[in-house]
Structures are given as structure tokens and as C-alpha cells.
Image (spheres, rainbow, N blue to C red):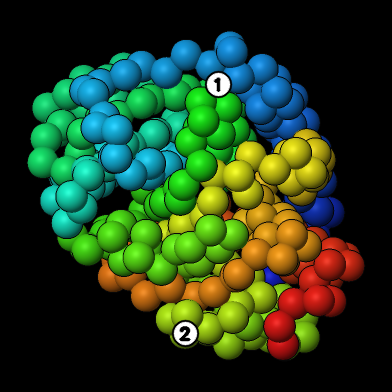
Amino acid sequence: MRELFRRVVPFSWRASAKARLATVRHTRVLARARRAFRSRGHRLDRLAPTRFGDAAHDAQPVVMCLWRRPERLPASLRALAAQDLPGGVRLVLWNNDAGNDELYRRIIPSELGGALRSVELYSSDVNIGGAARMIVGRVLSAAGYVGPVVMIDDDQDVDPGFVRSLVDRWAPRTFAGTWAWRIHGDYWDRTAAEDGEAATYVGTGGSVADAALLADDVLAQNLDSPDLMCEDILLSARAHELGYRVVGADASFRFVEDEHDQWHALADAKSELYSRRGSFAMFPR
């Protein structure tokens, strides 16, 4: 599996030149993303979402980052409206592709209802990836929220019991998720963590964590670095450093495969980051 995700380095001069150019472009994009995270993450007063509906006081916060899948939003909203959750869902959307803002603003009102009590749409002119979840965590914490935050991706089709299953597996100082692994050596030497089993690493898509963990100041400082796009590695590391319970969670969903997956490009970066995080030596083997 490990070799499947490795980037093939071109050997011709032209291919090598293209690879170098792509690296330079990525570095520039990442620098912009870091500046965007810094400005948004530490100036919460400047964040002004578009709000739809009114959340009940006991509605469960669910955070979803959007990236170039506008056709997926109606299905995602309907899936959340169908959740078996007495208090309903307070959905916080972070759009990493501002060109779709107007489309989203037209779609959202028609899908409110059922368990979907309210939607808050934040927009970013720079793609900061899943690190946006931590900004939302800071917003929620700054407003006094202290409970669990559920995180899903826009390429996940979730069943009606999905959010409730994650919340049921949460307790204070817990980070639990459906994409959970026990790592035995390097990043790709791993086995899946079963429901409730201690995990080395938990992916942020399809997970639940304390708002306080997402808002952690040390985590934010780590995100303000070249590792910004590997927020799942940093969040797992920080959870272990703080002594959180990090476990697998069983909640039913299906991945939707398309060409917009960003994690393929980050596979090498995640493996490298995992290998140099000294705190990972404390993780369960």
C-alpha cells in the first residue's frame, strides 16, 4: 500500500522542470494558506458567516469543509437533515473555494429542515484545507461551547445514525473517529483500530473531538507552519500529548470517489511529518 501512494519522480529534464515548478507553486500556495490561517485563526472577530435558520440550544455542532464539490452539497445537507438526533444539527460549513459562495447561498435555504436546524457558511479566498476545523473550534470555544464537535468531509455519504454514533462514543477529553489506525512502525505500517480500540492516529473526516482540543493554542501554533495541510497528524499528536483518549469509532458512511481528493498529494508529507513528531513515540503500537 505504501508504494501505491508514493509520488513517482520524473526522470526527463522537461518532466523534472515541471516537477520543480509544481513544487514552487505549491510552496507559494502553502505560504498564502499559512497567512490566511494566521489571520483568521487569531482574529475571530473578523469572521462573519452567512447564517441560515436558528439552531436549538442543544443542537450538535457539525463541521464540514468544502472543496470544489458544489454538486455534493445538496446530498450532504439532506443526509444531515435525516440524522436521528433529538436536538438536531448545527452545521458549520467552511468553504475553501470562494468561487462557489453564491451557489451555496442559493442551495442552503431550500435544504433546511428535519434535523438540520441551522447552517453557518464561512468563506475563505485561500484553501487552508482541514485546518479550518480548528478555526471553527476556536469560534465555538470563544462563544462558550465546551462539548463535542463532529467533523465530516464533503465526500462522505453518512447514514441517519452517523452523528449520533459519534456523539455516543464521545466523552470529555476524547478524540474518536471512523478512520482510525494503530501504527506499528512508519506511517504506512498500520492496522485499523476497531470500535473503542486505542488508536495511534485518527483522521478528521468522520470524527468527534472536544471543542477545547480543536481550539488548543499549541496546536494552532503548529498549524501556522509548513505542516498546515496535515492537520490530522497534528491533531492526533496533540491529543496524545494532552493525554486524551484516542480511539476508533464505528459510524456508518461511504466515501464518494472523485478527482478532487487532496490527500493523495499529501501522502508523502503526512508520512514525513509522522516520522519526525517525537510525541508519536508515545502512541500505542
* In-front residue for pair 86/179: 86
Residue 28 visible from this viewpoint = no
Q: Measuring from the top left, give residue 142's x and y in whole percent.
A: 57, 27
Mark 2 vs mark 1, CA separation in Å: 38 Å
In the rendered image, the vertical position of residue 248 relative to residue 155, given as above or below: below
Looking at this view, is 153 or 163 the one in front? 163
Residue 170 is situated, as x and y percent measured from the top left of the image, at 45, 63
* Disc 2 residue crowd, few under 14, some 14–19, many 20+, Cα 10 Å: some
Name the residue: 81% across, 76% down: 282
Name which residue type carries label 2: Glu
Which one is in front in this view, the residue at disc 2 or the one at disc 1?
2
**Which residue position holds label 2?**
194
Secondary structure of residue under mark 1: loop
Q: Which residue is more in the foreground, 154 or 265? A: 154
Residue at image point 29% right, 33% down: 57
Task: Say the numbered circle drawn on residue 125.
Answer: 1
Q: Quadrant of residue 131?
A: top right
Q: Residues within 10 Å of mark 1 (few under 14, many from 20)?
A: few
Number of labels in the image equals 2
Q: Residue at x 67, y 47 (%)?
A: 229
In the picture, which quadrant includes the N terminus? bottom right
Quadrant that contains the C terminus: bottom right
Q: Are marks 2 and 1 in contact (CB under 8 Å)?
A: no
Q: Is residue 175 left or right of residue 200?
A: left
- Name which of mark 2 and mark 1 comes first in the sequence: 1
- Which structural element holds mark 2? loop
- How far across and down, in percent of the image, does residue 112 sit? 15, 31
User: In x, y percent, where is residue 144?
Assistant: 51, 30
Identify residue type, mark 1.
Asp
In which quarter of the view is residue 280 placed?
Answer: bottom right
**Residue at 46% of width from left, 50% of height from top?**
148
